[in-house]
Image (cartoon, grey):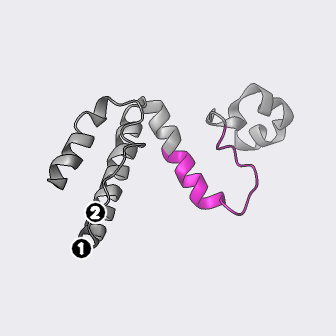
Amino acid sequence: MRAQRILDIFKDVHSDPSLGKFAAWPVPPAVLRGFLEKLQRIHRSWRARFMIMRLDERRREELRLKCFAHACFSGRKRRWGFQRVWEGNYLSQQVCAAVDGKWNSECE
């Protein structure tokens, strides 16, 4: 009976804008508490993957790089740019090239 309730709750979750983030999970009996926690972990993982796959390829690559940067800079650097869109090679851009012309001349 409880399994059917879970199936009913998540029946159309893929078309829900929040992908089931706010779905009310049933209260399990004590013996199933660990199992329900695993189901919730599986749902969060599915939801995250589904959200990432909605992004275009450029945005997915940017997200991958930001995750890598978070692993490198989190707790070490205060503002490392995770809130903004990343442009790519900043040294090759005109604004940076004008400021740091020496760097570009050394690289040539």
Q: Is residue 101 left or right of residue 73?
A: right
Q: What element carries label 1?
A: helix
Image height check: is 76 above or below 103?
below
Identify the disc placed on residue 5. Answer: none
Q: Which residue is drawn at 83% across and 30% down?
A: 98
Q: Is residue 68 magenta?
A: yes
Image height check: is 58 above or below 74?
above
* Contact? badges 1 and 2 (CB < 8 Å): yes
Q: Is residue 31 magenta?
A: no
Which residue position holds label 1? Answer: 31
Residue 34 percent across, percent down from the top left: 30, 70
Quarter of the C terminus within the rendering: top right
Tell me the amino acid under the disc marked 1. Answer: Val
Report the magenta residues as a range.
Answer: 64-83
Q: Furthest-top residue in view? A: 94
Residue 71 percent across, percent down from the top left: 57, 60
Q: Furthest-bottom residue in view? A: 31
Q: In this view, does 15 lie to the left or right of 107?
A: left
Task: Name the image quarter holding residue 33.
Answer: bottom left
Label 1 CA crowd tier, 10 Å (few <14, some 14–19, many 20+): few
Q: In this view, does 60 lie to the left or right of 108?
A: left
Tell me the amino acid under the disc marked 2. Answer: Pro
Q: Which of 39 and 61 is in front in this view?
A: 39
Residue 82 percent across, percent down from the top left: 64, 44
Q: Furthest-right residue in view? A: 99
Task: Name the image quarter holding residue 16.
Answer: top left
Identify the disc placed on residue 28. Answer: 2
